[in-house]
Image: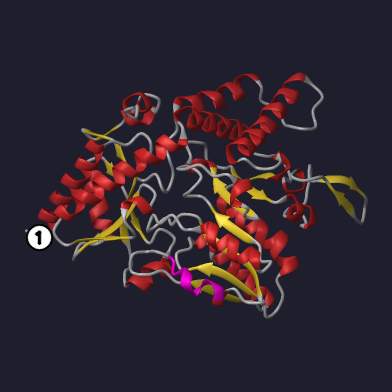
Amino acid sequence: MTFPTEKIRSDFPILKRKIGSKALVYLDNAASSQKPKQVIEAMDAFYQSSYANIHRGIYTIAEEATELYENARKSVARFLNAASESEIVFTRGTTEGINLVRFAWGRKNIEEGDEILLTEMEHHSNLVPWQLLAQEKGATLKFIPFDAQGRLQLDRLDSLLTPKTKLAACAFASNTFGTINPVEKIIAAAHAKGIPVLLDAAQAVPHFKIDLQKLDCDFLAFSSHKMLGPTGIGVLYGKKRHLEKMDPFLGGGEMIKKVEWDHATWNDIPWKFEAGTQSIAEAVGLHAAIQYLNHVELDKIFEHDQSLVRYCMERLPEIDGLTMYGPPAHERTGLIAFSIRDIHPHDIAAVLDRNGICVRAGHHCTQPLHRKLGLEATVRASFYLYNTKEEVDLLVDGLKDTVKLFRK
């Protein structure tokens, strides 16, 4: 069955946009995805007919708002096959979710001399929080290295997991190489030694199915805005036994049960971690995004992403001096990072923009990874369910024009 790209594209108003005289070609989905009308309309309807603060109101629209917000939590739990909706904590995004674990779990469980195991391909959001915790506690960071094709060298895993290791934190999929990491092996090896595992799933959840009960990780964080939903909301999944032992991340309203002048007791999970007024409309939008992805089906989206990245990797060698980074197409999500000899990535992105083509140029919040490759920056093209092979052709044509411009 043919993937219904044209039908899908009709659901995204922004894809009708032109940049100058050129049709918009949006290839920056690893940074943030576009939004279908179903998400936009769901949030608009909420603001027009049911907007109120949640949990505390006893009037009709407050009860409606509360039900919509909590239905979003149930939707996320089903989407990920979590054991319980109480294991789903709403955050502002992946970064806040990881920092929540840093503060609420890390400060209680990491001590001087302990080790935290990461990988060399982590986004800064899954690196800098652990740097800060290690500096605060006197702990040490260790790293699983990657090889020349952007694959983790797991032959070193057993020696890196020591009696001092208290946490392993890993990108499920790299935002620079696109590599889908064998996280099941990391989880199994860590759990065999009693070590909990956190997954940064920002690049994974939007693209392929995740079954938390089979995966068995201890924590998993992701963002709504990369999976057709709005900005300002994300999810932290945590196993119930961990969340119940953790202290609150933020103090204030909603996360309490009883407050005295000099102390307070905490609400049940997950609300213990959701202080203050939450992103209610954004939760409604996330729920609508999940419904959209379920309708299209993640398995089909993943096949579509991989067909585009495979086609793009076949065509990019037509560009003189172009180098691609990362593994073969079947081992990655729908993104490609590359460089072109003697042309700065920012110049490439600027020329492509004149043709309406949106790509990312820079270090993609993976400066140590780029440094290991001997690079300051790369260009990244990233695909999603509304992209087409014709857009890949436009990208390749634009790159050929760029090379001609800079090599006159």
Q: Is residue 101 left or right of residue 79?
A: right
Q: Which residue is mark 1?
A: 407
Closer to us: 278 or 69: 69
Can residue 319 be seen at all in this image of the molecule? Answer: yes
- Residue 353 screen position, x and y as percent: 26, 45
What range of the chain is rendered magenta?
152-158
Judge whether 28 appears above or below 115 on screen.
Answer: above
For the stretch drawn in magenta, the main secondary structure is helix
Residue beneath the point at 46% across and 58% down: 181
Residue beneath the point at 71% across and 41% down: 84
- Residue 346 screen position, x and y as percent: 28, 57
- Residue 66 screen position, x and y as percent: 72, 29
Q: Is residue 131 left or right of residue 408?
A: right
| Colour logic | secondary structure
Q: Is residue 47 left or right of residue 15?
A: right
Residue beneath the point at 74% across and 53% down: 243
Amino acid marked by disc 1: Arg
Residue beneath the point at 57% across and 21% down: 45
Q: Quadrant of residue 175?
A: bottom left
